[in-house]
Amino acid sequence: MLYPLKFEPILKEIIWGGDEICHFKNLHPQRSGIGESWELSHVKNNVSIVANGELKGKSLEELIETYREKLSGKKAIERFGTTFPLLIKFIDAHDSLSVQVHPNDSLAKKRHNSFGKTEMWYVIRATPDAFLYSGFARSMTPEEYLQSIKDNTFTDYLQRHDVKPGDVFFLPAGRVHAIGAGCFIAEIQQTSDITYRIYDYNRKDANGNPRELHTELAKDAIDYTIYPDYKLNYTPGQQPIQALVSCPYFTTNLIEGKKDDMIQTTHPDSFSVYIGLEGTVQLIDNNDYSVEIRQGETVLVPAENRLTILTFKEEGKLLETYI
């Protein structure tokens, strides 16, 4: 019988990583230089391993092959086959990430035989001077884009956003973006590891070489449209379940509660993922299987376990995402 699943985090040492992830997730020993924790992943060579219950030690790959629609849901299997469709991460930017863009489904299929990458960010923590880039502030053509890369002026065209905890950004494939120094973020995205690096502040890698750029590949992937707003506007604390993002690839809600609050959720024919942002929440499924979601933990509730009851052990916040 399937039950709510936790997974071993896949920790990534990256040139711009900090020391917040281990503290946030209460991992020991503490490690610095960790830029990302892949919480739930079906990316090749980075497949998550179950950390709790009878299925401990099994890979997400094995679970999907065995349980198929019982795990993912019938619609997800029809659309994405035996690929789990979402990749969940925590990102700690001690230094700024490269400016990048991701291809859409059609371009990714043509070039890489892969899904594209639409994603979203929820800012968990931010230093007073933290910022990020999302979208264009000034119009540019593909030709001007190429020239700006040569001139080191590309970031002059981008929309810079000062950020604070609770800020949310939706990033459809094609939107140029970069996480700035001082941002600690939860990221929900399509299962894809295809990134076109556009600009990297002339940084060198561990061997002293310039980091690879994907200037030509990015040119055709970029959406050059200027939009009126790139930040999602909502009122935190207005209601226990706050809708954030709904797109063809995922729906995401913010769930907030005070001590002893109880919230019931159900998502017919879809898995659901709960990401602990603050506090401790007890989750009980329709088979009376109970698991605690602590800050920094991620839980996958299989599609066949449709009903969940969330009980807040203290004031807390969760992200909930599903298809």
Image (cartoon, grey):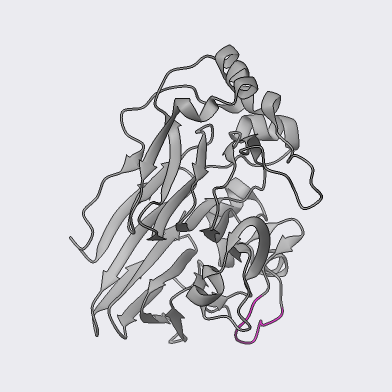
Q: Residue at x 50, y 73 (%)?
A: 299
- Asked whether, in this view, residue 201 is left or right of residue 158, the answer is right
* Residue 107 higher or lower than 133, as above or below: above
Residue 56 or residue 163, whichever sits in front: 163
* Residue 144 higher or lower than 23, as above or below: above
Residue 156 or residue 115, whichever sits in front: 156
Is 55 covered by the magenta stretch? Answer: yes
**Which residue extends farthest left?**
238
- Give the main secondary structure of the magenta stretch: loop
x, y percentage for residue 108? Answer: 67, 35
**Residue bounds of the magenta highlight:** 50-57
Q: Residue at x 39, y 58 (%)?
A: 126
Q: Residue at x 53, y 31 (%)?
A: 174
x, y percentage for residue 139? Answer: 43, 18
x, y percentage for residue 28? Answer: 61, 84
Q: How many marks?
A: 0
- Asked whether, in this view, residue 164 is left or right of residue 56, the answer is left
Quarter of the figure that contains the N terminus: bottom right
- Asked whether, in this view, residue 180 is left or right of residue 17, the answer is left
Q: Could one spot residue 40 in this view of the protein?
A: no
Residue 28 or residue 74, whichever sits in front: 28
Q: In which quadrant of the rendered view does residue 267 lie?
A: bottom left
* Residue 46 higher or lower than 311, as above or below: above
Q: In which quadrant of the rendered view does residue 240 lie?
A: bottom left
x, y percentage for residue 138? Answer: 41, 21
Q: Could one spot residue 314 in this view of the protein?
A: yes
Is 178 covered by the magenta stretch? Answer: no
